[in-house]
Amino acid sequence: MPDQRGDDGIVGRLVQVLLDAGIDGLGPLKSARELADVARLETRTTEGAVKKIVRSHVVKGGVGGFVTSVGGFVTMPVALPANVIEFYVGATRMVAAIANLKGYDVDDPQVRTAVLLTLVGSEADDVLAKAGLTGGSGGSGKVVGLVGQQLPPAALLILNKAIAFRLLRGFGEKAFSRLGRGIPLAGGVLGGGIDVWMMKRIADHAMGEFPPVDSTSTVVRPGGY
């Protein structure tokens, strides 16, 4: 019988890694707020900054997928977990930076959960249902609109864990996709292509889920520029 406490521990650690490294920055990694500030200074417009951040993370996702796949089956047991964690930390930073640029406070627990929920894309409604919550009305800003309802901390914790469980399923899905990456070099090209596609899909979803604060009635605290 599976150890539920062990599963909860893994899920809790994944949530913490995404929040600590992906949003707040850890070690050499800049925080999402710092990343957004640098991009804004370099491009001088919000739209330009968002495009710059998306472009850099899509490229990094592709490089990471190539490097961790190029060794084929020999390096797969080590490379797969490293690639998945690196990918989702990068995706979290990208989404949080986009949210910050659009005027959302990424220190707000509600917004932080919205950032994580964006990572699951079209499966958000299923994750919400598993957490005992109902989805929004659909359309732009559904995710951030839901968490903007000021969910209590206990509900946010349950939702964060449901998101992490879904992301952990991605380990198995990536492992399956890597069956076609067993040949060195060719596998690297395929691995990089898959990660580019996934990162771009998350970026597109994030841009729809985080409309500018002044264009939505969602209850969030602005980023304080």
Image: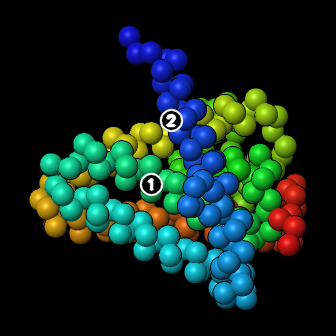
**For the residue labelled by badge 2, is the local secondary structure a helix, a strand or a loop?**
helix
**For the residue labelled by badge 1, is the local secondary structure a helix, a strand or a loop?**
helix
| Residue at left offset 51%, top offset 60% | 90
Report which residue position mark 2 lands on. 165
Report which residue position mark 1 lands on. 86
Q: Residues within 10 Å of mark 1 (few under 14, many from 20)?
A: some
Q: Quadrant of residue 175?
A: top left
Task: Say which mark, if any, is on residue 96.
Answer: none
Q: Is residue 215 left or right of residue 12?
A: right
| Residue at left offset 76%, top offset 29% | 154
Q: Quadrant of residue 38?
A: bottom right
Q: Is residue 116 left or right of residue 72?
A: right
Amino acid type of the residue that numbered disc 1 sits on in the rendered structure: Glu
Q: Residues within 10 Å of mark 2 (few under 14, many from 20)?
A: some
Task: Answer yes or no: is residue 216 visible.
Answer: no
What colour scheme has been applied to the protein in the rendered image?
rainbow
| Residue at left offset 38%, top offset 11% | 1
Q: Residue reaching furthest top?
A: 1
| Observer-nearest of 172 and 31 | 31
- What is the CA distance from the residue labelled 2 to the residue labelled 1? 17 Å
In the image, residue 40 lies at what x, y percent? 71, 81
In the figure, 60 relative to 124: above or below?
below
| Observer-nearest of 79 and 139 | 79
Task: Answer yes or no: is residue 8 visible.
Answer: yes
In the figure, 77 relative to 97: above or below?
above
In the image, residue 141 lies at what x, y percent? 72, 61
